[in-house]
Image (cartoon, rainbow, N blue to C red):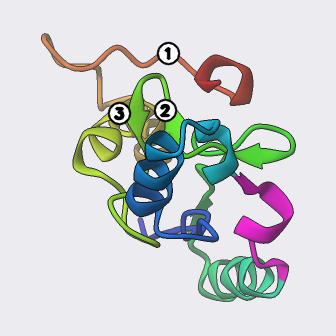
Amino acid sequence: NVVLMQDSPTPDSNVPICLGRADWWGESLSQCDTPRALALDPAIIAAERAAATATGSAYVDLTDSFCGATFCPAILRDDIVYRDDSHRATRYAARLAAPLAVALLPLIGSSAANPAGAIPLAPRGPAANL
């Protein structure tokens, strides 16, 4: 099976620099959050979905693991989400293993059981992450 994974939301700043400045000035770290509408490009999403459909590929969207209904926070569950202005931080990327597995396991069928010691496959939505 071929899977096209939607690009992750793009923050509107270099997240660690924004967080450092906010902390330095004693301001709210939430000023580094990106409005969901700015973090996602509908044209790119449409092109990705069209490419998946045209090739018969599955399409995986993990946006809800990054964003709530209106904002994509710079920090989720005590982890900085991005290490710059577009790349996921290593620790947060590791947290995506469970939602990615939830999305992929149905695509590879029931023969892929959760092996002993694997990350529990609990579905997570925006409310669980914020």
Mark in the foreground, 3 or 1: 3
Which circle's residue, 3 or 1, is located before the other in the chain?
3
Q: Quadrant of the N terminus?
A: bottom left
What is the CA distance from the residue labelled 2 to the residue labelled 3? Answer: 12 Å
Q: Which residue is mark 1?
A: 122
Q: Quadrant of residue 49?
A: bottom right
Q: Quadrant of the C terminus?
A: top right
What is the CA distance from the residue labelled 1 to the residue labelled 2? Answer: 7 Å
Q: Give the percent coordinates (x, y) of residue 61.
A: 63, 55
What is the CA distance from the residue labelled 3 to the residue labelled 1? Answer: 12 Å
Mark 1 and mark 2 in contact? Answer it, CB < 8 Å.
yes
Compare residues 98 and 59 and report the one nearer the observer. 98
Q: Give the percent coordinates (x, y) of residue 27.
A: 62, 39
Amino acid identity at mark 1? Ala
Please give the label number shown on residue 95.
3
Which residue is pictured at 57% across the width and 21% down the height? 123
Amino acid identity at mark 2? Val
Q: Determine whether the residue tagged by mark 2 lies in a helix, strand or loop.
A: helix
Q: Give the percent coordinates (x, y) of residue 73.
A: 63, 43
Mark in the foreground, 2 or 3: 3
Q: Which residue is mark 2?
A: 102
